[in-house]
Image (spheres, rainbow, N blue to C red):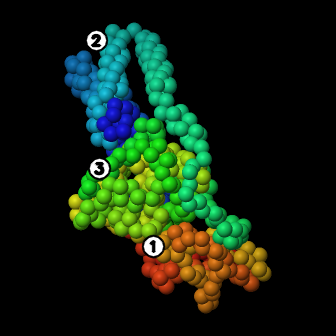
Amino acid sequence: MRGGIGSGTASPLVAVAGAFVDRTPAWLKDFAIQTFGTNDKLALLVGMGIVLTGLCALIGVLGAGRARPLSKDGEGVRDLYIFWGLGVFAAVGVVGVLAVMDRPNFSWPDTIPTIIGTLVGLWTLDRLWRRLAPSQPEAVPMGAGMASRRTVLAWGGGLTVVGALGIAAGRALSRAGEVVEAARASLGMLHVAHPVAVPAGATQGVTGQTAYITPNNNFYRIDTAITVPQVDPDAWRLRVTGMVDQEIELTFQDLLDADLVEALVTLTCVSNYVGGNLAGNAVWTGLPVREVLARAGVQEGADMVLSTSTDGFTAGTPIEALTDDRNALLAVAQNGEALLPEHGFPVRLVVPGLYGYVSATKWVTELKVTRFDQDEGYWTPRGWSALGPIKTASRIDVPRPGEPVGAGEVVIAGVAWAQHRGIERVEVRIGDGDWQEATLAEEPTTDSWRQWMLTWQAEPGEYAVSVRATDGAGEVQTEEHALPAPNGASGWHTVDVQVR
Ligand SMILES: Nc1nc2c(c(=O)[nH]1)N[C@H]1C(S)=C(S)[C@@H](COP(=O)(O)O)O[C@H]1N2
Ligand SMILES: [Mo]
């Protein structure tokens, strides 16, 4: 996968967006996720579109030499405008090439489309502008401007068609998406040594309460990838490198042939706000990471595994979380189905108890055994903590804020999580009343969230309803309010409920 031609990013737009994401500081990532949620990438592309349109307008104005000539020598001034117009266009092209070179797995052929596009654009603009710019401005006959405009439109239309054909040809040539679809579909029954069954008691079934298992197509998605990596499982390799007795390499088939285990694990994003929904629960099928690390032989002094994705993302995970008895998996399936491409097909990491940014590498291709004083994960130099244990959290799903309820019996319900420590108690406070203990659903494992509910005899009025959880170690969820950066939000989720 590494260094292979075509595994880099050839599209200048995608490359610039990717390079931008890589340089996003913590506060901006935070803002983007809070403002745009999972549409943050779309927002970025729209923003880029606006900037590009502005630049094109500038290039157009410059090239057409609309500004009043500064001297009698109109022709010279026009040449100057054309020079600057082409200059700005070339600069945009250079930025595109630099961004393509900045991308993971870069190889020189990736720059070809951007270079050709820029050269064709420069040549076309130059020809157009020279047609528009007659050498004797006063000798332009009436109506000549109209003819020129028609010419410009014809050229513009022609180029648009050529561009569209180019994109279509590119799509047809890259069959990656189809290969991945076929591979996902052909992944049959997995050989699972330790299956899990979800007990019925894990679900309380209150209307509006978060489902215990999150459907795959409804699972939150957070990553830095502008386009979803399409990784052919036949070409996929996992390399285990660094402080090991012997480097090893696994194929996808090696994984499928191993004794796979199933585990219920709730993933959570460090960017989740109090009450937010960047968390999801699934049954994951995979090979315990500790078995792979044992095969390679971890050397004395290592304290971190740096996992790397095809897209260049990395996560630094404390080695004990990957070698102790918890279900840290190289996962190949989510809720019994091959991973979706956006959730890491063919293989991703899932580690109970740690936020995704330090553990849940999707499209994972390398595990480097190393030390925290020698390596750091993707988000660490961008203002996020090197360590990311998940903070105890609880959320009120119903009643929803802004949806008044009738007086009488009202069910307050939600979920709480403290992965790998478990949830021991959930309490609810209504208005300035006492904390009341909620009823907990069954907890099949401490690694997943736990549903809770409380029935309330509500009288008309306005109430602030708060929730707090106590983890398996007896630690009460802190009231102290913290924003997501640098190591996760904290504070009690409070909802204003209106009873009529
Ligand atoms: N390759 C890659 N893996 C990644 C990320 C990423 O940006 N790139 N983001 C991580 C983060 S921040 C989270 S919270 C989880 C989210 O996993 P999901 O999108 O399957 O919910 O993936 C993790 N794995
Ligand atoms: Mo995340």
Q: How far across and down, in percent of the image, does residue 183 sit?
A: 54, 38
Tell me which amino acid carries mark 2: Ser
Q: Quadrant of the N terminus?
A: top left
The structure residue drawn at horizontal position 47% and vertical position 23%, both measured from the top left corner, is 169
Q: Earlier in the sequence, mark 2 or mark 1?
A: 2
User: Which residue is situated farthest in the bottom direction here?
Assistant: 434
The residue where tag 1 is placed is 391
Q: Which residue is mark 2?
A: 135
- Nearest the camera: 256 or 9? 256
Upstream in sequence: badge 3 or badge 2? 2
Q: Kindly indicate whether the residue at mark 2 contacts the one at mark 3 (C-beta within 8 angstroms).
A: no
Cβ of mark 1 under 8 A from ligand 2:
no
Q: Residues within 10 Å of mark 2 (few under 14, many from 20)?
A: some
Mark 2 in CB contact with mark 1 (< 8 angstroms):
no
In front: mark 2 or mark 1? 1
Residue 354: x percent and y percent? 43, 66
Residue at numbered disc 3: 247
Query: Along the line of sight, which residue is nearer the eye, 49 or 313?
Result: 313
The amino acid sitting under disc 3 is Glu
Which quarter of the figure is the C terminus placed in? bottom right
**Element type at mark 2:** loop
Residue located 39% across and 33% down the image: 11
Residue 315: x and y in percent read 36, 57
Is any atom of residue 451 visible in this view? yes
Instruction: Give the residue drawn at x 56%, y 35%.
Output: 182
SS type, badge 3: loop
- Measured in 3D between alpha carbons, the distance from the residue under mark 1 to the one under mark 3, in whole angstroms, is 35 Å
Q: Position of residue 20 (x, y in %)?
A: 35, 47
Residue 459 sits in quarter: bottom right
Up the image or down, 151 lies above or below 85; here it is above
The answer to whether 91 appears left or right of 214 in the picture is left
Tell me which residue sits at (45%, 37%) in the image: 234
